[in-house]
Image: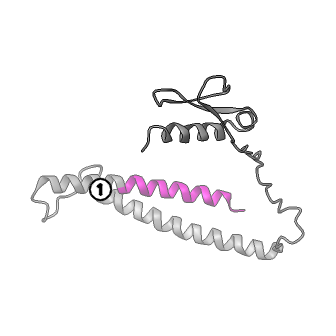
């Protein structure tokens, strides 16, 4: 790329970023006797030409207004009996899921046997046994987290 093109692109970009102040003031491109290009706000030296830079207008950001559903007359309403039925269904589903997770947790803890599960026949390699113990420990932690999350959700249901 030409040595004079790169500074020109830089100057135009700089003028665009500065916005109205740079666009309203005068910008001059000056080339000296060695061919070096500089940009200035005065064209008092020999070899300077005035650049026409269009102003860049950046609109002020306005956050979108949140829709207020409580006062919107077109927002769908649910009668209380339908909502109560939905809440009861949700509670039943969460209780079933909690019961399943608690049973799974009990099975995992029984198999884990306080960190000393029984070795299986395919675990002649001791590292396989250790890997299974770590998987059991991770499964127990994950299932305990699931149980806690389900209990939190049950507390939220009316």
* Residue 13 belongs to the span the image colors magenta: no
* Residue 151 belongs to the span the image colors magenta: yes
| Residue stretch in magenta | 139-158
Report which quarter residue 41 is drawn in: top right
- Of the pair 120 and 14, the residue shown nearer to us: 14
Spot the residue most to the top: 44
Q: Residue at x 33, y 52 (%)?
A: 137
Residue 131 x/y as whole percent:
22, 54
Q: Main secondary structure of the magenta part?
A: helix
Residue 76 x/y as whole percent:
82, 73
Q: Residue at x 44, y 38 (%)?
A: 3
- Of the pair 133 and 21, the residue shown nearer to us: 21
Quadrant for the C terminus, please: bottom right
Residue 62 x/y as whole percent:
78, 48
Q: Which residue is mark 1?
A: 135
Residue 144 x/y as whole percent:
45, 54
Q: Residue at x 75, y 38 (%)?
A: 20
Please determine whether, in this image, residue 133 is positioned above or below residue 47.
below
For this view, does 37 lie left or right of residue 137? right
For this view, does 74 lie left or right of residue 129? right
Quadrant for the N terminus, please: top left
How would you rate the neighbour count of disc 1 (Cα within 10 Å): few for under 14, some for 14-19, many for 20 or more?
few
- Of the pair 12 and 51, the residue shown nearer to us: 51
Please determine whether, in this image, residue 43 is positioned above or below residue 121.
above
Report which quarter residue 15 is drawn in: top right
Q: Residue at x 90, y 69 (%)?
A: 73
Report which quarter residue 106 is drawn in: bottom left
């Amino acid at each position: 790329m030409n040595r004079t093109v790169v500074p020109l692109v830089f100057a135009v970009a700089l003028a665009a970023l500065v916005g109205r102040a740079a666009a309203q003031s005068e910008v001059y491109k000056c080339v000296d006797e060695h061919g070096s290009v500089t940009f200035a706000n005065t064209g008092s030296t020999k070899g300077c030409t005035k650049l026409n830079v269009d102003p860049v207008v950046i609109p002020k950001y306005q956050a979108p207004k949140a829709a207020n559903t409580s006062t919107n007359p077109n927002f769908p309403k649910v009668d209380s009996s339908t909502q109560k039925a939905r809440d009861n269904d949700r509670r039943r589903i969460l209780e079933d899921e909690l019961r399943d997770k608690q049973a799974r947790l009990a099975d995992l803890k029984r198999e884990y046997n306080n960190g000393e599960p029984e070795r299986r026949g395919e675990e002649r390699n001791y590292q396989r046994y250790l890997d299974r113990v770590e998987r059991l420990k991770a499964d127990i932690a994950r299932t305990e987290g699931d149980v806690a999350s389900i209990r939190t959700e049950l507390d939220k249901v009316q």
